[in-house]
Image (cartoon, rainbow, N blue to C red):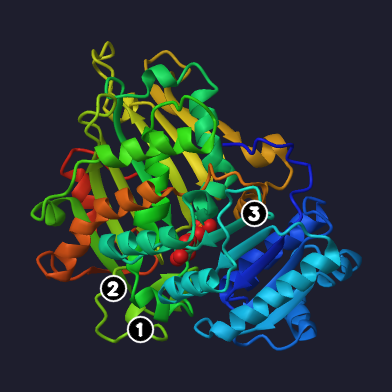
Amino acid sequence: MESMEDPKAAANACAMVIFGSSGDLARRKLLPALFALEMEGRLDERSVLIGFSRSETTHEAFRERMRAAAGGTFDAAAWDGFARDLYAVPGEYDDPASYVRLKAELDRLDALNGIPGNRLFYLAVPPDAVPGIVRRLGAAGLTPRHSGRAARGWTRVIFEKPFGHDLASALSLNDEVSRILSEDQVYRIDHYLGKETVQNLLVFRFANGIFEPLWNYKYVDHVQITVAESIGIGTRGRFYEGAGALRDIVQNHLLQLLTLVAMEPPVARDADAIRDEKVKVFRAVRPLEPGDVTRFVVRGQYAGGTMDGEPVPGYRAEPHVAPGSATETFVALKLLIDNWRWSGVPFYLRTGKRLEGRSTEIVIRFSRIPHLLFRNLTEEQTRPNELVLRIQPDEGISLSFGTKVPGSELRIAPVTMNFTYACTFGARPMHAYERLLLDAIRGDASLFIREDGVRATWAIVQPILDAWRTGTAGPPAPYPAGSWGPAGADALIERDGRRWRNPA
Ligand code: BG6
């Protein structure tokens, strides 16, 4: 999944346009990522960034606002150089004249800076604005397809998640987009795939000989994947009310982690070979029947509670949230993958806001030993081996095994071999958005979601959305902020004689 090019080499000169440049994502993630790339010398010096939004006014005002967002270790001289390449185009997403102005500005900057017509559009806008923007980009002649000798430069469009709202809307958005762009111009982002530790999953699996022979139903008892957040919904109530944890995290981040754990080795390292294997996993996920949803899926919503000794409000008391909201802030579910490798191995997934700790991790729980030689030992003393891939924080990998406690009696205690990125490598890992922006500029789509991947993931969650919509599954269960979610989530896994591993 590594970029094919020298990671240190500067990427292609291009004009990047951020739709929604006055929004949260642009300020918190995109601009800091681009500035970091600039400081590391990874952007071609001819490149420019254009902010397109209805609240943009002047280039200067845009630069000032972005300066405040640049964050991190601020290098004023580097900033001045970067800021000169920031431009604002005030515009309405549904106003054709705004796109004419945008095109004129792009042409002017191409000529001014010697940019060879390369354009990267980033749609950091609410989902309902996306189809209209794509149509208008097309109508304004801003999305030429790549083919043909006459084609000048490349055009790529990055789509933020969620891509669609459910299976039907994702299909129709895919259709709409494919009328205007070819699939190789479409970059559907899931920032989890840009995380260093997530990319390491494939390296860990396919660049090491000892784990892969064990990585199947014969030796793995089950897999747990947790994306736990301690933060609440903050100021995002308006967006979240229409989304919920299933759309916000399960359909994308959690299923992407699942597929990287479960996929077969790809035949090559290119984007399509990797994505072919990922999609095969999604297709093999056993579809949930309507009656399965109550048995295999638990949803919850955080109530008030205490975090770090401070009282925090419940979800329904957050700004822009309906007092009787039924939006879930927690989901736990059990999936089975019907293929040769994973037959009968449950994958337990969960995610939630306002949980006791922030932690994303994957637990591979190996099977129990077939014959217990040490009969007088408790089950606790002969715990099955566990491999934990810590995605964040405290990024690293640990493997637990039983060892004899020194002494005359036979006692066994679980111990852990632990690798942490911070201790071993020290250096700051590249942030997910830096990596993904750079890949998009270089035309490497390995870490982006292909059209069939989007379809397949929505197909997995659609039965859950249906059951929740029709009310057959009951409302979300409240759980206190600062806990590990509703009791139903424990029951889901304990029914199978297993337990969640709650990160320390
Ligand atoms: C985003 C979700 O995709 O991921 C947010 O919309 C969530 O709700 C965030 O907080 C988590 O990302 P990270 O990188 O902080 O784990």
Q: Is residue 467 visible?
A: yes
Q: Are marks 2 and 1 in contact (CB under 8 Å)?
A: yes
Amino acid under label 3? Trp
Residue at (8, 54) in percent of width and height: 291
SS at mark 2? loop
Amino acid under label 1? Val
Q: Where residue 288 appears, x then y in whole percent?
A: 16, 49
Q: Is residue 499 above or below residue 26?
A: above
The residue that disc 2 covers is 327
Residue at (39, 33) in percent of width and height: 277
Q: Where residue 493 appears, x then y in whole percent?
A: 22, 45
Q: Looking at this view, is 234 or 472 the one in front?
A: 472
Residue at (60, 67) in percent of width and height: 142
Q: Between marks 2 and 1, how big is the CA–CA gap?
A: 9 Å
The residue that disc 1 covers is 321
Q: Looking at this view, is 385 or 57 the one in front?
A: 57
> In the drawing, what numbered circle is on residue 119?
none
